């Protein structure tokens, strides 16, 4: 009897080990690229220029780094070396005022600020002059339930991650509705459905990458709107984890100069890099407060030369990383 | 008599700020961790009339709300609010300020 029990137990253990090995081989890829090296960090908690109270979004453009400083209700602008240049935005819901600015984007010479509390996208000149606002609170077409991120096409069309709306909306530049992915207000884990989407990025060929926040995955849609693929853990079905290619809440996505996809992996305290087809390339960062460590990497932006800037949320700072030389 | 009236007036003046200090609610919430969650809850709470201050402790999963005197938050109201924000409300403690 004892032998039978031992045999069964041994069989179960072998089965579990085999299953773990399969998962490891199939869903935990190795890095195929050299990593990134930490260059610099700046910022600390506070409200003075150069300090942050919840940095939640970041975008780089023409040698400048724009950062959403959420609880200070402002946008701060820095040189690539971290020197403070200017700031704009005040607390409120009037033109040019901000509630909780989140992910950012720049198109042409205009800054698109996603305003989570005011349910709108505000557009500024790069020096901070408010130009226009798109959207309002609601569940209808062109309305938002706390937007998280925005991407802008060459023709000015907008793609907005509508966090509580559980959808990605495609709008014209004037805010008129074109179409949406996902069912309004309904969480889903299957392809084309969302679980609190946080951000979007648009490749130069029109491919749309959506950060499907609490589904712990990236979803990809073709220029014709058709679902192409998804990745993040086994079957990309809301299975989170700390392994290569897995996520633990996705809060930001950006496309690098070579079309690679950079993802802020919030609870894993790292940035992961993928090829456009979702092949894992490399990752950098780990939890902590020291140089090169993150306490919740919330947003990522990649400069034309490949330098990566990251909003390090709990540490209230910005980090700069560069590709390791081969 | 004059002294008594003066004392009563002083007591009244002294008590006004105490009476008007309001109430602090401390709510325990499951799954509260990222700023998207925290801001979503803050956004909904600040729409309630009389809410004066909201603090969110992500690490402890606590939402601390100060309301004006006479304003009351109910368990039912909070359960629905946190459900709408995508989180599970667990409990609430109330403290007069």
Image (spheres, helix red, strand yellow):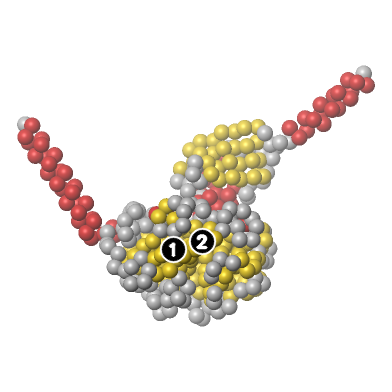
Tell me if I can see residue A82 in this picture. Answer: yes
Reading the image, the residue beneath label 1 is A38
Q: Nearer the viewer, residue A49 or A132?
A: A49
Residue B57 place in picture, x, y as percent: 53, 44
Label 1 and label 2 in one chain: yes
Q: Rate crowding at label 1 as few (under 14), some (14 to 19) or many (20 or more) other CA atoms within 10 Å.
A: some
The quarter of the rendered structure image containing the C terminus of chain A is: bottom left
The CA span between labels 1 and 2 is: 8 Å
Chain ID, mark 1: A
Q: Secondary structure at mark 1?
A: strand
A156 sits left or right of A250 in the view: right
Residue ID at (13%, 39%): A9
Residue B85 place in picture, x, y as percent: 51, 50
- What mark, if any, has residue A251 been given in the picture? none
Q: Rate crowding at label 2 as few (under 14), some (14 to 19) or many (20 or more) other CA atoms within 10 Å.
A: many
Residue B74 place in picture, x, y as percent: 58, 37
Residue B34 place in picture, x, y as percent: 48, 52
Q: Are marks 1 and 2 in contact (CB under 8 Å)?
A: yes
Chain ID, mark 2: A
- What mark, if any, has residue A41 been given in the picture? 2
Q: Quadrant of residue A81?
A: bottom right
Q: Nearer the viewer, residue A260 or B63?
A: A260
A233 sits left or right of A194 in the view: left
Residue ID at (40%, 58%): A285
Residue A315 against residue A1 in the figure, above or below: below
Q: Secondary structure at mark 2?
A: strand
């Amino acid at each position: 009897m004892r032998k039978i029990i031992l045999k069964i137990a041994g069989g179960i253990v072998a089965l579990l080990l085999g299953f773990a090995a399969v998962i490891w081989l199939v869903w935990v890829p190795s890095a195929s690229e050299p990593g990134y090296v930490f260059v610099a960090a700046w910022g600390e908690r506070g409200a003075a220029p150069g300090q942050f109270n919840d940095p939640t979004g970041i975008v780089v453009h023409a040698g400048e780094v724009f950062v959403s400083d959420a609880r200070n209700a402002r946008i701060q602008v820095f040189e690539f070396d971290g020197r403070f240049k200017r700031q704009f935005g005040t607390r409120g819901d009037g033109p040019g005022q901000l509630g909780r600015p989140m992910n950012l984007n720049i198109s042409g010479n205009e800054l698109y600020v996603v305003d989570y509390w005011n349910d709108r996208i505000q557009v500024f000149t790069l020096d901070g002059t408010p130009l226009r606002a798109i959207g309002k609170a609601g569940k209808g077409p062109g309305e938002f339930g706390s937007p998280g991120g925005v991407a802008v096409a060459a023709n000015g069309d907008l793609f907005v991650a509508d966090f509580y709306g559980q959808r990605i909306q495609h709008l014209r530049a004037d805010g008129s509705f074109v179409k949406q992915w996902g069912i309004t207000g309904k969480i889903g884990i299957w392809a084309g459905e969302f679980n609190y989407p946080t951000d979007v990025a648009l490749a130069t060929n029109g491919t749309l990458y959506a950060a499907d926040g609490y589904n712990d995955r990236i979803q990809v849609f073709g220029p014709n709107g058709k679902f192409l693929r998804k990745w993040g853990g086994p079957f990309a079905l809301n299975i989170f984890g700390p392994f290569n290619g897995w996520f633990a809440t996705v809060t930001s996505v950006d496309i690098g100069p070579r079309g690679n996809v950079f993802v802020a992996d919030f609870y894993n305290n790292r940035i992961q890099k993928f090829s456009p087809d979702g092949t894992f390339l490399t990752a950098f960062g780990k939890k902590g407060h020291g140089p090169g460590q993150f306490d919740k990497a919330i947003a990522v932006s990649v400069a034309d030369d490949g330098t990566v800037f990251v909003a390090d949320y709990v540490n209230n700072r910005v980090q700069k990383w560069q590709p390791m030389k081969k | 008599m004059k002294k008594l009236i003066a004392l009563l007036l002083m007591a009244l003046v002294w008590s006004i700020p105490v009476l008007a200090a309001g109430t602090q609610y401390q709510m325990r919430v499951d799954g509260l961790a990222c700023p998207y969650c925290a801001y979503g809850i803050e956004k909904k709470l600040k729409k309630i009339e009389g809410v004066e201050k909201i603090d969110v402790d992500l690490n402890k999963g606590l939402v601390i709300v100060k309301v004006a005197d006479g304003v009351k938050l109910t368990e039912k109201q909070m359960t629905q609010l946190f459900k709408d924000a995508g989180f599970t409300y667990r409990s609430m403690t109330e403290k007069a300020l």
